[in-house]
Image (tube, rainbow, N blue to C red):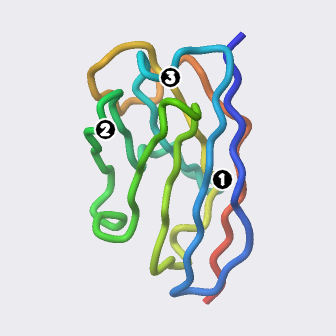
């Protein structure tokens, strides 16, 4: 059974940093593309970043480019999202997701496996 468990969220002041972690089990991570999504109250779930099995990354909205970095450790079955210079508009629940295969995918419907999410709150 595939399980994804996020951690590392919390309350941080604007300009601060957080590192989200996603622990995967029940799968061979090297055969999956993994992604981070976020959902703010009243908004749709949004692709933030994705990374293929070999480490090719892709980022969603322009607002996160240059501030967020996705990485993974296939041996440890871990996926990370380093978030720097956080802004109040980054406040959301952040979800880790996994999709079997080697290509980059960015739509939520293409990811069959999801974690429960971790709350990130950025105060101004």
Q: Earlier in the sequence, mark 2 or mark 3?
A: 3
Q: Which mark is residue 55?
A: 2
* 28 left or right, relative to 42: left
The residue at 27%/62% (across/down) is 62
Within the image, what quadrant is residue 77 found in?
top right
Within the image, what quadrant is residue 25 found in?
top right
The span from disc 1 to disc 3 (Cα, nearest Å) is 23 Å
Q: Are marks 1 and 3 in contact (CB under 8 Å)?
A: no
Q: Are marks 2 and 3 in contact (CB under 8 Å)?
A: no
- In the depicted structure, whether residue 43 falls above or below residue 66: above
Bin the neighbour count of mark 3 within 10 Å (Cα to Cα): few under 14, some 14-19, many 20 and up: many
Q: Earlier in the sequence, mark 2 or mark 1?
A: 2
The residue at 36%/64% (across/down) is 64
Q: SS at mark 3?
A: helix
Q: Which residue is mark 3?
A: 29
* 115 left or right, relative to 107: right
Q: SS at mark 1?
A: strand
Query: Is 24 in front, or is 109?
Result: 24
Q: Which mark is residue 93?
A: 1
Q: Earlier in the sequence, mark 1 or mark 3?
A: 3
Quarter of the image with the C terminus is bottom right
């Amino acid at each position: 059974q595939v399980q994804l468990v996020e951690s590392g969220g919390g309350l941080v002041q604007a300009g601060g940093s957080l590192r989200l972690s996603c622990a995967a089990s029940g799968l061979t991570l090297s055969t999956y593309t993994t992604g981070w999504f976020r959902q703010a109250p009243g908004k749709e779930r949004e692709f933030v970043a994705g990374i293929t099995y070999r480490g090719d990354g892709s980022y969603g909205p322009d607002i996160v480019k240059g501030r967020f970095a996705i990485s993974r450790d296939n041996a440890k079955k871990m996926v990370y999202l380093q978030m720097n210079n956080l802004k109040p508009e980054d406040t959301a629940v952040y979800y880790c997701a996994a999709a079997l295969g080697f290509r980059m995918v960015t739509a939520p419907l293409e990811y069959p496996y999801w974690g429960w999410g971790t709350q990130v709150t950025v105060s101004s």
